[in-house]
Amino acid sequence: MSESRRTNLSPSALTFSWDNCHRCLWLEYNHQLRVPATMPLVGELAEMQESYFFSASGLAAGTPVLTTSMHPDIPLGKVVSHGGWVQSTPIKVNGEDTHLDIRGKYDLLIEFDNGTYGVIDCKMQANESNKSKFYSPQLEAYAYALENPVKGEPKKVSVLGIYAWSLDKPWGDVNFGFGYRVKSSWYPIERDPIALEKRLTDFVTMVNGDMPESKASCKQCSYIADRDAIIKGK
Ligand code: SF4
């Protein structure tokens, strides 16, 4: 067992990374070796979109934004937090604590009048596309951490969903400046703790097992192998 292995599971690892080849994930979670990646503009656009509804202009300080100003289909609630960290108690597999807990940062937290909460993940998309099924384990992981926090009071989560902006058309002029008009979409996600439990079990089993095979079709691994062969031949 590597001493440098990760002890926090990031909710996003349950979607993109899990869907990809498991060898990179195994290396990251056992040796903290991450694939270098750059995602130009993604972080900046996401931050702008999320903060727009957390600190909306025109509202007196401390006045929460209501979900009705985001999309009419989102259940009525107040946006009470943006980019908050959550950390769960240890993940259990077959009733036993594992070395991993869930730790991550949600986009928006909604509070409803009945005392329950909602977690909204914000997305920027080129075209309207419902990815709620794909993101379900990630959102369910935030709910798990809020309902089973390592510190503080548990929060009951009743709503999960994706709030997406997709590109519509450019607008503006040279005097006012230019922008992209976007369409907003709401994709609710059904709570599914059983599916999360299965994904977490599969994840922990993979991480605790032998290093998985790499994917033959991955250009990154072919690049590393070709590069190593050249360097070793010098
Ligand atoms: S094939 Fe190699 S580089 Fe590609 S995801 Fe798997 S381990 Fe990573």
Image (tube, grey):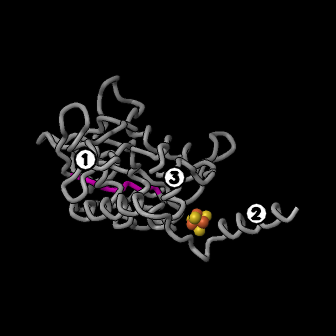
Residue displayed at 49% across by 58% down:
25
Residue named by callout 1? 118
Whether ligand 1 has any atom under 8 Å from the Cβ at mark 1 is answered as no
Taking the image in four quarters, ligand 1 sits in the one at bottom right
Q: Give the vertical position of 150 relative to 233 (above or below).
A: above
**Residue 228 badge:** 2
Mark 1 near mark 2, Cβ–Cβ under 8 Å?
Answer: no
Helix, strand or loop status at disc 1:
strand
**Is residue 176 depicted above or below 158 in this figure?**
above
Q: Is residue 161 magenta?
A: yes
Residue 28: assigned label: 3
Query: Residue reaching furthest right?
Result: 234
Residue 153 visible to the viewer:
yes
- Cα distance, mark 1 to mark 2? 48 Å
Q: Which residues are magenta?
A: 159-165
Please say if the residues under marks 1 and 3 sit with CB atoms less than 8 Å apart: no
Q: Check disc 2 and report its element: helix, strand or loop.
A: helix
Residue 218 location (% of width, % of height): 62, 71
Which percent across, then down, holds residue 133? Answer: 34, 67
